[in-house]
Amino acid sequence: MKHIFKAIITLAASAAVLVSCTKGFEDINKDRFGVTDEQMAQDGLALGGMFQQLERSVIIFRDGTYMDSDYQIMYNLCAETWCGYMAPTLSDGHHAGWDVNDGWHRRMFTVKYEYGMGGFRDFEKAAVELNMVNELALAKVLKVATMHQVTDYYGPIAYSHYGELTNLYDSQESVYTQFLTELDESIATLEKLAATNAKILEDYDLVYGGDAAKWVRFANSLRLRLAMRIRYANAALARTEAEKSIKSPFGVIVNNSDNAVMSGVAHHPLYEINTNFNDADTQLGASLEVYLNGYNDPRKFHYGKPASDGNLHGVRAGIAPNSWTNYKNTAAKVSAPNAASFKLCWLNAAEVAFLRAEGALVGWNMEGSAQSFYEQGIRLSFEEWGAEGANAYIANKTAVPAAFKDNVGRAHAAAPSTVTIAWNEAGSEEAKLEKIATQKWLALFPNGCEAWAEYRRLHYPVILPPANNFSNGVVNTEQGMRRVPYPVSEQKDNEEGYNSGVQALGGNDNAGTRLWWDQKPFNN
């Protein structure tokens, strides 16, 4: 990995020059001799292209540097499958059954370092030289938004030691502590800027158009997400950081108009993966189907297309058919993701409402009740997807997840849970938590990274296990896959760092070892 990191820094610097920009930035790059450092700092010219690289690194998509196939390998074949959203319809179904493929799962590790951390180092160097404090604070927020996905996949990672000659890993506890500290510092800086109604990198920002107040709300919401992630590992710190976000003068995201959505994305990568990759390399997952059908969820045909019989039919992960023909789009026996309308969303108002519902459930000051935030989260999700009938859905006391009836083969399965929708204040804390987690999972779609992390943290929703567990006993069928092993190349290229990571992990470097924040007891 020593050699990899040297190459990463070089590649990131090159990518910063090549990345596409707006409003004449290309012309400025052609002739910079007449532009002073002061002018570059004032107009954001020095950092604009690099800033867009950082935004693009949060969720990789086809952008001229990376392709939809990179998204497929990093997200679709991994987290989106393991959380129950999707099921691959490739010739090799073993990965979906937890027989992990190093060629696929290593991409989250290598690409995020190259595009995220490498890009941040270039940005940081330029920002420090030009004394652009506000821009650097915002870049740190994007670094955290990118790199928390990496540690949530693998566990300990090189973070404070990134780019050093010896790339030792930080424990995940240390990484999360650094995340929260960086967010605290960045939010304090950006709040001052937002108080003046100022803009930041307005000509280059592909998410909020330079609106500093919206960036503060995003940063507060990200801090709330990460605080809740560590609730079972460090409850005191989690509560402190979560309540800071709520008390901020700008607060957290409460409206869909503030959702963190990337502009300039022609199609969500899932559209290309399903439409143009072998007539469908992915279809809707069986777990998602049983909840959407069981609840008769009005969002279901926003999420997936009806099969030829007019119904929603998912695919069970971990199947091993002799032929995949009937799982393809031309057969129309299963439901494709309705991805032409999907947005590339990092974090939405519905997720924030469900995070506040969980916080209120355990006694934190979220400025409202668990029930109010739970119901608000459902309404926000319906609004985001343009679905009607939220009030009737919220009041439904009887609907439960359906059994899975395989529309192609014989991978049938009983209903995974009996959780209902309507809030029941008389229910146990655990029963309420399952409701919150289940509806949050539905509202997070198609953000598989976050859904898989929350499924591991809360053990909800209860999803269908793969039809076949191909892990050779490494992964407990009832508990599911807990993490991703480090890339095999790390053992050779960064032996010292790799060994420090495994030691900090506190278990074997395999898919069955739990992460630091993954401490909720099973069978609760």
Image (cartoon, rainbow, N blue to C red):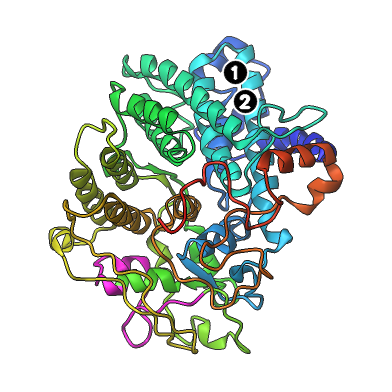
Residue type, label 2:
Phe
Give the extent of the magenta segment: 293-316
> Can residue 472 be seen from the camera position used here?
yes
Q: Position of residue 190 (x, y in %)?
A: 41, 19
> Can residue 36 be seen from the camera position used here?
no
Is the C terminus in the top left, top right, bottom left or bottom right quadrant? bottom left
Do labels 1 and 2 touch, CB within 8 Å? yes
Is the N terminus in the top left, top right, bottom left or bottom right quadrant? top right
> In the figure, is residue 383 to the left or right of 392?
right
Towards the viewer: 122 or 160: 160
Q: How would you classify the magenta stretch by its main secondary structure?
A: loop
Residue highlighted by disc 2: 123
Towards the viewer: 125 or 253: 253
Q: Position of residue 361 (x, y in %)?
A: 27, 42
- Residue drawn at the location 50% of the way across and 45% of the way down: 519
Q: Position of residue 85 (x, y in %)?
A: 45, 64
Crowding at dot 1, Cα within 10 Å, few <14 / some 14-19 / many 20+, comes out as many
Crowding at dot 2, Cα within 10 Å, few <14 / some 14-19 / many 20+, comes out as many
| Relative to 392, residue 290 above or below | below
